[in-house]
Amino acid sequence: MATFVELSSKAKMPIVGLGTWKSPAGKVKEAVKVAIDAGYRRVDCAYVDQSEHEVGEAIQEKIQEKARPFMRKACEKTLKDLKLSYLDVYLIHWPPGFKSGDDLFLKDNEGKMIGGKATFLDAWEAVGELVDAELVKALWISNFNHFQIERLLNKPGLK
């Protein structure tokens, strides 16, 4: 759906977007989720719209919908390849997420890896579902600094 225009900065911007101006409170979140499902990749919001909180919630929920199946699929492939029914430990090896795609690491035109929108907190939650499904016994982290560890430890609902 998205048709893009290249800006003078070389950034690409979707031509069509969803505007939130004068949208009723409590309705914006669902509208943004439906728009994302329909292919929209631009949402026009501003502080004066008083809808940024709902827009942010919608975007995060849609990111989570993508992250969870990806984590499960990756874990199930690992189990199949290793010929195991569960893993003792599943490790989040690196705090920054990377954009998923056909290649293991998607790269931009300059050869730099493209970051994903999901955070390590999102990844922890998604991997936690693997524990609930008894595919993984424990979750570990690696290469996290103390600020990231504190954020993880202070996450509500930490398992």
Image: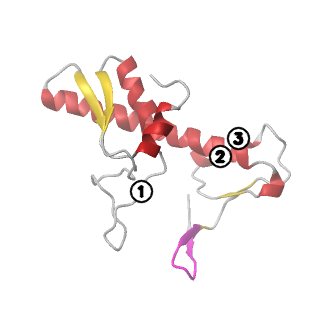
**Which quadrant of the structure image shows residue 34?**
top right
> In the structure shown, which secondary structural element does the residue marked by tag 1 occupy?
loop
The residue shown at (36%, 21%) is 131
Residue 34 visible (yes or no): no
The residue shown at (55%, 58%) is 1
Please state which of the two labelled residues, at mark 3 or mark 1, is closer to the viewer: 1
The residue shown at (77%, 48%) is 51
Mark with earlier residue (3, 2): 3
- The crowd level at tag 1 (other Cα within 10 Å; few <14, some 14-19, many 20+) is some
Tell me: residue 89, above or below residue 2.
above
* Residue 47 place in picture, x, y as percent: 78, 56
Going by the numbered disc 1, the residue's amino acid type is Gly
Say which mark, if any, is on residue 29: 3
* Residue 152 place in picture, x, y as percent: 47, 35
In the picture, which quadrant includes the C terminus?
top left
Which span is picked out in magenta? 4-13
Q: CA distance from mark 3 to mark 2?
A: 8 Å
Q: Give the residue at mark 2.
A: 56
Tell me: residue 18, above or below residue 147.
below
| Residue sitting nearer the eye, 116 or 62 | 116
**In the image, is 142 to the left or to the right of 18?**
left
Say which mark, if any, is on residue 37: none
> In the structure shown, which secondary structural element does the residue marked by tag 2 occupy?
helix
